[in-house]
Amino acid sequence: MSNDLNPVMTLENLRIHLLATRDQGRTKMAEEDVRAPSWAAGDVVARLLAKRLETEGVIRAQVWREAMFSPGGDNVRTLWFLLIWRSGESLEVCLPDHPQMEIMVGPPEDAKSPSGLNLCIALEGSENQAWGSLRLWGAELLPDPFQEDQNWRVASSC
């Protein structure tokens, strides 16, 4: 199947898919008695996200959390998503919990992103505010990356 036949991913529909996955994930975790934050919760969300984005051509989703520091030295926790398309294209979404750090959407290094995707989310723009409710999802979903006793791993749809 040609990549041209796949729907074009936009920042808006990506955000809508992530919000819907967050809400659906909460319900699914309650049904399966999966406690969050946990890696089991991350696995549930990764599977739901991959399933939800199948119609967009996504074949795999991964979710993880990383520790970072803001330019001012604040502890920042980031929620990451990696989406992989059947065409071989891939996209990373980085959602820092710090309101003054940019949300990053783009291909991993040396990879190609899905065609048609606008990769800019300006910190001062209304689009950044629209993504704001997703910034704290990581604290709800996955273990704190600053805690020494947490084993770092990636939650995956497969």
Image (tube, helix red, strand yellow):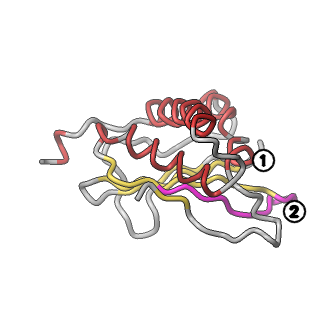
Chain part drawn in magenta: 62-75
Looking at the picture, which amino acid does disc 2 mark? Gly
Give the secondary structure at mark 1: loop
Residue 129 colored in magenta in the image: no
Looking at the picture, which amino acid does disc 1 mark? His
Residue 72 colored in magenta in the image: yes
Query: For mark 1, does the 10 Å Cα neighbourhood hold few (<14), some (14 to 19), or many (20 or more) residues?
Result: some
Residue at image position (63%, 27%) is 126
Residue at image position (44%, 31%) is 13
Per the model, the C-alpha gap separating discs 1 and 2 is 11 Å
Quadrant of the frame with the C terminus? bottom left
Quadrant of res 7: top left
* Residue 57 point in image, percent of width and height: 28, 45
Q: Residue 73 carries which label?
A: 2
Which of marks 2 and 1 precedes in the sequence? 2
Q: Which mark is residue 98?
A: 1
The secondary structure that dominates the magenta segment is strand
Give the secondary structure at mark 2: loop
